[in-house]
Amino acid sequence: MKARIYQPAKTSMQSGRSKTKRWVLEHPRSSAVVPDNLMGWQSSADTQRQVRIYFATKDEAIAFAEAKNISYEVRNPKERTLRMKTYSDNFAFDRKGAWTH
């Protein structure tokens, strides 16, 4: 199985892009998840799944994986598309969408 090198996307609760600049190397799940008998929580004997290594650049993550002989797969982030809009577009007559006032 290959480790993933990716740049995480921002969560829906985040307004800024602070935690999306780092690159992450994480290992895939190598054993099945079993529910715990007492509490019902997920448990596994796989400890590599708990480790995430953060890097400043993609090249650093690739160099680390190659130095440790870890097979890896790089997932590049999708480009953001910004829709430029002005405040007056909210009151335009040809506006698409419901008027909420």
Image: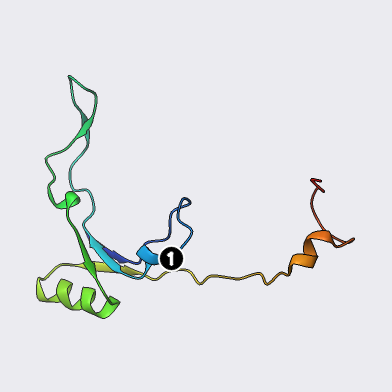
Residue located at (37% from left, 62% from top): 8
Relative to 48, 74 lies left or right: right
Q: Vertically, is 19 above or below 44?
A: below
| Applied colour scheme | rainbow
Residue at figure coordinates x 21%, y 22% from the top left: 39
Above or below for 38 versus 76: above
What residue is disc 1 on?
17
Extreme right residue here?
Answer: 93
Foreground residue among 10 and 59: 10
Q: Is residue 33 left or right of residue 92?
A: left
Disc 1 is placed on an element classified as: loop
Q: Going by the image, does 85 lie left or right of 45?
A: right
Residue 66 position, x and y percent, is 15, 75
Q: Does residue 31 lie above or below 36 as drawn?
A: below
Classed neighbour count for the residue bearing mark 1: other residues with Cα under 10 Å, few (<14), some (14–19), many (≥20): few
* Horizontal and vertical percent position of residue 16: 46, 63
The quarter of the displayed image where residue 14 is located: bottom left
Please tell me how many numbered marks the rendered image carries.
1
Please report the residue visible at 19 percent of the width from the left and 50 percent of the height from the top.
49
Which part of the image, by quadrant, shows the N terminus?
bottom left
Measured as percent of width and height from the top left, residue 54 is found at: 23, 66
Q: Quadrant of residue 57?
A: bottom left
At 39% from the left edge and 71% from the top edge, which residue is drawn? 76
Amino acid marked by disc 1: Arg
Return the residue nearer the eye: 25 or 28: 25
- Residue at the farthest top position: 38
Q: In which quarter of the image is residue 41?
A: top left
